[in-house]
Image: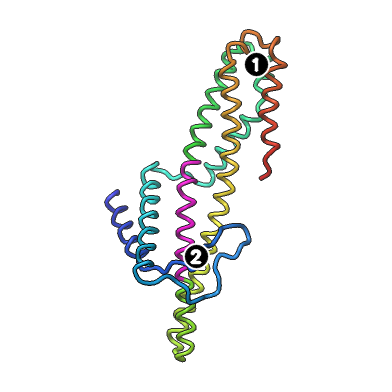
């Protein structure tokens, strides 16, 4: 399996080394233009080859990382499930649960264990998303570059009155435009998910640390310190209101 991955990546590197680099740097954002009109400003010669080589090497490292972090790449459903779990744990009123429980220590321990599991799962998701985003941007820029090259060839073929080539490169331009749009949409979607998952996970980590550090006092003197701990938990929960997604 790994041999096949390395073979595919070698092919990818060869293809990437022949791509034209976009003349202008594109920023990725919702609703933003992701390519400009074809201009005769692309890099050529040794500079283009070196730049293309560096992009292909970066893409190879990203692909190898994704191939080795896990046998199963997180799917959208599991990512959302982990986000929902973290959100519910942040919102859980653990002090209230302990008050009505016959075993306060067991209730708190189970909650802290659930927090630890959720945080670990989320950190794996975060790592995957952080590695995926640069790869999507590289793929998008490759599609943009190929579209610009096809656009240039289209206008040249029109000037030569070559209908066969003009039809061919026009279809290539359309395909690469679609490719760039799809990569941009995927980038924006995963970027939003990463932002929200990272924020909720850090909030849950703060709550877990507070409860873990104070668990002996909470278990043995819940009534006397409840107000103080509750205020600290309220401050942590208020963090959620400070971030607008």
Mark 2 Cα-neighbour bin, 10 Å: few <14, some 14–19, many ≥20: some
- Residue at (65%, 16%) from the top-left corner? 98
Residue 153: image quadrant is bottom left
What percent of the width, then of the height, locates residue 57? 35, 55
Q: Quadrant of the C terminus?
A: top right
Mark in the foreground, 1 or 2 = 2
Looking at the image, residue 105 sits to the left or right of residue 179; the answer is right
- Residue at (60%, 21%) from the top-left corner? 210
Please tell me whether residue 182 belongs to the stretch shown in magenta: no
For the residue pair 56 and 181, the one nearer the viewer reads as 56
- Residue at (44%, 66%) from the top-left corner? 21
Compared to 3, does 117 lie above or below?
A: above
Label 2 belongs to which residue? Answer: 179
Earlier-in-chain disc, 1 versus 2: 1
What percent of the width, then of the height, locates residue 100? 68, 15
Q: How many dots with numbers?
A: 2
Looking at the rendered structure, the secondary structure element under dot 1 is: helix
What percent of the width, then of the height, locates residue 67? 37, 47
Outermost residue to the bottom: 161
For the residue pair 75 and 166, the one nearer the viewer reads as 166
Compared to 8, does 90 lie above or below?
A: above
Looking at the image, residue 203 sits to the left or right of residue 143; the answer is right
Outermost residue to the left: 3
Q: How is the image coloured?
A: rainbow
Please tell me whether residue 127 belongs to the stretch shown in magenta: yes
Dominant secondary structure of the residues highlighted in magenta in the image: helix
Label 1 belongs to which residue? Answer: 98
- Residue at (55%, 27%) from the top-left corner? 115
Q: Which residues are magenta?
A: 126-146
Marks 1 and 2, Cα distance to the nearest angstrom? Answer: 53 Å
């Amino acid at each position: 399996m790994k041999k096949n991955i390395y073979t595919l990546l070698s092919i990818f590197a060869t293809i990437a080394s022949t791509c034209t680099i976009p003349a202008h740097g594109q920023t990725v954002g919702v609703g933003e233009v992701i390519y400009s009109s074809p201009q005769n400003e692309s890099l050529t010669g040794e500079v283009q080859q070196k730049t293309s080589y560096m992009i292909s090497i970066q893409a190879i490292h990203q692909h190898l990382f994704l191939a080795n972090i896990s046998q199963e790449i997180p799917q959208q459903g599991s990512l959302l499930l982990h986000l929902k779990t973290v959100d519910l744990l942040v919102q859980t009123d653990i002090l209230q649960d302990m008050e009505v429980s016959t075993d306060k220590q067991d209730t708190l321990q189970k909650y802290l264990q659930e927090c630890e599991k959720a945080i670990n799962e989320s950190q794996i998701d975060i790592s995957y998303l952080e590695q995926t985003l640069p790869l999507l941007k590289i793929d998008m820029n490759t599609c943009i570059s190929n579209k610009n090259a096809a656009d240039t060839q289209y206008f040249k073929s029109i000037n030569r009155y070559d209908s066969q080539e003009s039809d061919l490169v026009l279809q290539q331009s359309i395909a690469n435009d679609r490719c760039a749009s799809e990569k941009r949409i995927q980038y924006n979607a995963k970027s939003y998910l990463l932002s929200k998952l990272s924020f909720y996970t850090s909030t849950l980590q703060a709550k877990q640390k507070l409860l873990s550090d104070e668990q002996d006092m909470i278990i043995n003197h819940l009534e006397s310190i409840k107000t103080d701990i509750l205020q600290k938990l309220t401050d942590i929960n208020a963090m959620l209101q400070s971030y607008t997604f």
